[in-house]
């Protein structure tokens, strides 16, 4: 059995959906579980709906809901030769149930409300894809992932209950393959034991594919993307990028850890545990080879990878009372940082100071600094870039540091990390 994942870009309009059907039909002899994200930028649009609802901005709320439904209606209109009454009624129902919310008292719990609304993006996209596949006489069946992926109730970033999920998949999902070749389901969503929708964190559909592959002992997972595979750098920051033909699970985990965004970081571990290969392939050129991620490590060092983090800020901390930076101070510091929800991208300490690098998000930083300043002298340096090079050598370091002032360098055997800023 194969697990496929199609992200938002691969279903962003009618011709994209047709292409998905084309790809699915390229593998006629295999059973497939297909995970689909919300169409195009629907998740972002639904986030705006939640904000409008929670701030009681009625006019904007209605407008946003109308626009989302219109966008999907247009895709439906272009996909089918005849008016698809079933899908039109389905979309109208969702619109009514959303519009209904503005006239009712809303739950105080923002994250709960967010998950109930934002998860609709995937519910809609999968329904449309299912109907289109059926129209093309592909034996497809829509399934509600909430029946299978069980999570806790940590809304917006729910944790999967693996035992329960495995049990639900064994008992209720596996038998469905007897009568269907293709099961279509939603990425990104799970459900609490009470049946409320949860989400697994933005861009979580890859992770969903990993969960299903693990529980189904799939032969492989393929993530279909608008790029030819995993590249050695983000083309946004780097020209002359190279495709990584084959890397190991461990290498993929390292790259994701340092900030490569091609695959959701949680996706790899379940696949690695069962040695299920992951292919990253182009939906534009589906027969091209893409990237293979597997247990094979021998090709990891062939191509250096570059991961850029822009808009970084270096924060330097010195205790006010002239004490050293030792365990006690550090644990207090890490507490403050973890409560503020900041992610440390790089850190370094000496006897009397501790430096860390984080993304410069004004909303988070103001709060954080006011807390730190109670106990520490805080100094900052803004406008920095952090580049991580896997499998570096001097030439690759020279290449990225041209016209830059190096603020700090950390090297281990395989990884160089350089904090730098533009020379003015
Ligand atoms: N639709 C969700 C998002 O945009 C999940 C995903 O695309 O992976 O975050
Ligand atoms: Mg998406």
Image (tube, rainbow, N blue to C red):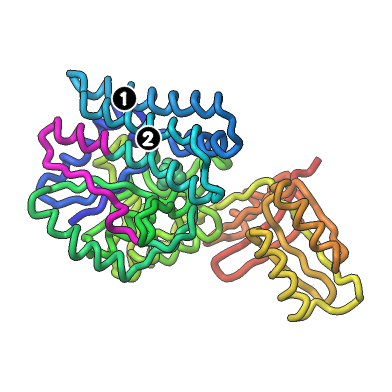
Q: Secondary structure at mark 1?
A: helix
Q: Mark 1: few, some, or many residues within 10 Å (few <14, many ≥20)?
A: some
Q: Is residue 181 magenta?
A: no
Q: Is residue 144 magenta?
A: yes
Left or right, 331 with respect to 113, comes to right
Q: Which residue is mark 2?
A: 39
- Which quarter of the figure has residue 343? bottom right
Q: How far across and how far down the image is residue 52, in percent?
A: 56, 34
Q: How far across and how far down the image is residue 51, in percent?
A: 56, 38
Q: Which residue is mark 1?
A: 75
Residue 44 seen:
no
Q: Residue at x 70, y 62 (%)?
A: 409
Q: Quadrant of the N terminus?
A: bottom left
Q: Secondary structure at mark 2?
A: loop
Q: Is residue 71 above or below residue 343?
A: above
Left or right, 176 with respect to 78, comes to left
Question: Foreground: 313 or 197?
Answer: 197
Q: Residue at x 51, y 54 (%)?
A: 305
Q: Is residue 73 above or below residue 199?
A: above
Left or right, 416 with respect to 187, comes to right
- Which quarter of the figure has residue 299? bottom left
Question: Foreground: 161 or 247?
Answer: 161
Q: Is mark 2 in CB contact (under 8 Å) with mark 1? A: yes
Residue 372 seen:
yes
Q: Is residue 224 above or below residue 41?
A: below
The span shown in magenta is 127-150
């Amino acid at each position: 059995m194969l697990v496929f994942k199609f992200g938002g870009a691969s279903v962003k309009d009618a011709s994209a959906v047709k292409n998905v059907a084309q790809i699915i039909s390229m593998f006629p002899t295999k059973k497939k579980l297909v995970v689909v994200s919300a169409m195009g930028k629907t998740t972002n649009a639904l986030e705006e709906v939640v904000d409008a609802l929670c701030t009681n901005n009625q006019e904007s709320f209605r407008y946003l809901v109308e626009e989302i439904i219109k966008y999907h209606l247009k895709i439906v209109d272009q996909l089918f030769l005849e008016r698809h009454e079933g899908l039109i009624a389905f979309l109208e129902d969702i619109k009514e149930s959303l519009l209904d919310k503005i006239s009712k008292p809303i739950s105080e719990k923002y994250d709960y409300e967010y998950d109930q609304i934002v998860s609709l993006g995937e519910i809609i996209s999968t329904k449309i894809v299912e109907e289109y596949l059926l129209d093309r006489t592909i034996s497809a069946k829509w399934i509600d992932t909430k029946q299978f992926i069980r999570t806790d109730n940590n809304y917006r970033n729910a944790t999967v209950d693996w035992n329960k999920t495995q049990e639900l998949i064994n008992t209720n999902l596996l038998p469905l393959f007897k009568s269907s070749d293709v099961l279509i389901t939603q990425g990104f969503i799970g459900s609490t034991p009470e049946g409320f929708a949860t989400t697994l964190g933005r861009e979580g559909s890859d992770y969903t594919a990993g969960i299903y592959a693990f529980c189904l002992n799939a032969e492989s997972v393929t993530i279909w993307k608008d790029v030819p595979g995993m590249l050695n750098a983000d083309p946004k920051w780097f020209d002359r990028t190279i495709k990584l033909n084959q890397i190991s699970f461990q290498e993929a985990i390292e790259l994701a850890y340092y900030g490569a965004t091609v695959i959701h970081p949680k996706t790899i571990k379940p696949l690695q545990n069962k040695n299920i290969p992951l292919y990253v392939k182009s939906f534009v050129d589906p027969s091209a080879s893409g990237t293979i991620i597997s247990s094979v490590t021998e090709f990891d060092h062939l191509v250096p990878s570059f991961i850029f983090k822009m808009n970084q800020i270096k924060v330097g901390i010195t205790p006010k009372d002239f004490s050293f930076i030792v365990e006690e101070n550090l644990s207090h510091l890490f507490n403050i940082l973890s409560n503020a929800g900041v992610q440390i991208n790089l850190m370094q300490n000496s006897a009397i100071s501790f430096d860390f690098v984080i993304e410069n998000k004004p909303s988070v930083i103001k709060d954080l600094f006011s807390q730190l300043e109670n106990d520490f002298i805080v100094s900052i340096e803004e406008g920095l870039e952090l580049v991580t090079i896997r499998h570096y050598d001097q030439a690759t370091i020279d290449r990225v540091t041209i016209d830059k002032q190096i603020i700090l360098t950390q090297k281990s055997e395989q990884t160089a990390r350089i904090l730098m800023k533009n020379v003015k």
